[in-house]
Image (cartoon, rainbow, N blue to C red):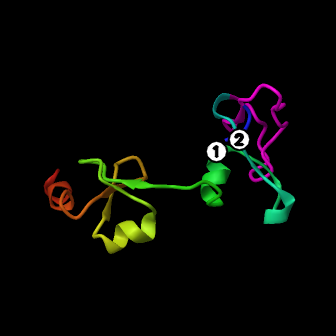
Amino acid sequence: MAGWSGDDAVPDRCDGCGRKAASCGMVEHGWTVRPSLAGFAGAYCPGCAAALQLLPWTIRCSECGLQKADEAVAERAGFLYFPDGLGGLLPYCGTCAPNAVRRP
């Protein structure tokens, strides 16, 4: 994320969602800058950067913490995803997934 070096001015708004910097997390958490050479150049809030897959992700088991480089690698390794009760999904490795299924 950009924005914490001291010489970067906070963008007015996110080039993805169009929300003002203060309302989309850019002031508090920073932003990602995508250069014009990479296509769809601009400054993106953390949410848009994640949705556009501009940031590298690792998948971590919610129970034991086992990490995989990305979603495809995790799924090939037997990771499964279960609802978190808040509208999102939590990843579980193949070892911990049976425990997640048994939870109420």
- Residue at the extreme bottom: 76
Main SS of residues in magenta: loop
The quarter of the displayed image where residue 72 is located: bottom left
Judge the density around disc 2: few (<14), some (14-19), many (≥20) Cα neighbours within 10 Å.
many
In this rendering, would 1 be left or right of 34?
A: left
Say which amino acid is labelled 2: Trp
Q: Which residues are magenta?
A: 4-27
Judge the density around disc 1: few (<14), some (14-19), many (≥20) Cα neighbours within 10 Å.
many
- The one nearer the camera, 16 or 29, is 29
The residue wearing badge 1 is 46
Q: Residue at x 74, y 34 (%)?
A: 3
Element at badge 1?
helix
Q: Is residue 16 magenta?
A: yes
Whole-percent x, y for residue 25 in the image: 66, 35
Element at badge 2?
loop
Whole-percent x, y for residue 94 in the image: 22, 64
Q: Is residue 69 above or below residue 12?
A: below
The residue wearing badge 2 is 31
Q: Are marks 2 and 1 in contact (CB under 8 Å)?
A: yes
Whole-percent x, y for residue 4 in the image: 71, 29
Say which amino acid is labelled 1: Pro
Q: Residue at x 76, y 53 (%)?
A: 16
Q: Disc 2 or 1, which lies upstream in sequence?
A: 2
Q: Distance from label 2 to label 1 (Cα)? A: 6 Å
Q: Is residue 57 magenta?
A: no
Q: Residue at x 78, y 45 (%)?
A: 14
In this rendering, would 14 be left or right of 91?
A: right
In this rendering, would 68 be left or right of 38?
A: left
Disc sitting over residue 78 in the figure: none
The quarter of the displayed image where residue 101 is located: bottom left
Whole-percent x, y for residue 10 in the image: 81, 32
The N terminus - image quarter: top right
